[in-house]
Image (tube, coloured by chain):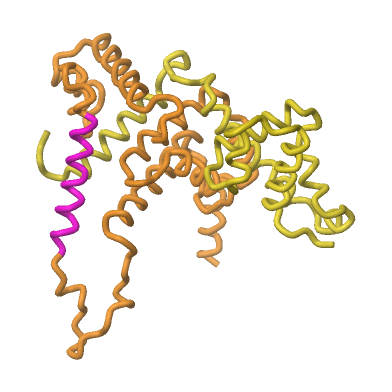
Chain colours: A orange, B yellow
Amino acid sequence: MRAQAMRAIRDLDVATPDEVAEALGALSPVEIGRLNMIAKIRARYAPNLEWRELLHEAIDKALSGARKWPRHLPFLVFMRETMRSQASEHRRKATFGLVTTEADLPARADGESVIGQAPSCAPSQERNVFARQILDQVLSLFADDAAVLAVLDGLAKGLGPLEIQNGAALTATQYASAQKRIRRGLVHAFPEGSPL
Amino acid sequence: MSKTKAVDQLDALLAGCEDMFLGAADRDVPGTKGAEVDATASFIAFRLAQRRLSALPVSAERRTPRGTAARRAIPRDAAGRRRLLGRLIASRPELPTRISMAFKSREPHDEEIAEMLDELLRSEDGPVAE
């Protein structure tokens, strides 16, 4: 009874497929432009994933209800999170292949888990090397712009705008100007019609 | 940047860049009038049309000759059909070669375009009850 009630409450917190369809149908060209750009940024860093494929898959998952839209999130933020999760999953599969669960592994005679004996640091190191390469690629787009590099460095550390401005001694205007240059740089890196 | 946890740094950096596009003023969002926006809008319109078709009651489908429901989604005018096919080709890399290459070697005739759209939408619809 309590579980049913909790499920009912959870269902109220997420949008229905009709609401998702309505939100998708109401997207303006500017909002679609934002989604396209986000897909390009995410897909660029998931090996062999084309940005349209990522975006289309996110739209399909949202429409089918495979991904639930929490009502408290703006629709574009929800779509961004959906693409983020898919790209991450794709990157993981591309890096490590298909997942093998413990149930797929042969049992040891002494009953010990095989996973407990497996080294765990290698995949983590590999992921870090891959991520480091990508970070360097992004930074190299702005190699000559100290203010932009300071902003990107702050973002990578998870800092907010004020912390970044204070740390890099940037005024609000300089910060906004750096953001514009970052946007332009990314657009330049992924021009209209490019495959990525 | 610290050399530890590059994965987390990358995720934070990408999220920060995405936020710049989510939070940018409309005039600062690039390519809002380009073909890529059109292609995404077409994909969304196509999926919504499919969704509406699939929501039709079965009895109505049964009264409809095979493919008629899908053909209703095709514009009546030749220019509209040509535009729809162009957008579908731009947004759907997985289309059959015959369709995806339609504009590559020569301009297809209006009848060919109508036929390709019909084929495409019918295959998307799946089998319809007779």
Q: How many marks?
A: 0
Q: Is residue A130 magenta?
A: yes
Give me the residue at 30% from left, 18% from top. Answer: A179
List the single residue furthest toward the left: B3
Q: Is residue A98 magenta?
A: no
Q: Nearer the viewer, residue B98 or A70?
A: B98
The image quadrant of residue A19 is top right
Q: In which quadrant is the C terminus of chain A drawn?
A: top left
Give me the residue at 38% from left, 43% from top. Answer: A84
Residue B101: horizontal and vertical position, in percent?
58, 39
The image quadrant of residue A46 is top left
Give me the residue at 67% from left, 29% from top. Answer: B83
User: Residue B44: in sight, yes or no?
Assistant: no
Is B94 placed left or right of B53 in the picture?
left
Residue A157: horizontal and vertical position, in percent?
18, 34
From what the image shows, is residue A4 above or below residue A147? below
Q: Main secondary structure of the magenta part?
A: helix
Is A98 placed left or right of B123 in the picture?
left
From what the image shows, is residue B106 above or below residue B129? above
Q: Nearer the viewer, residue B83 or A147?
A: B83
Q: In which quadrant is the N terminus of chain A drawn?
A: bottom right
Residue B63: horizontal and vertical position, in percent?
89, 55
Q: Nearer the viewer, residue A141 or A59?
A: A141
Is A27 placed left or right of B71 in the picture?
left
User: Residue A90: in sight, yes or no?
Assistant: yes
Residues in magenta, as a range: A120-138
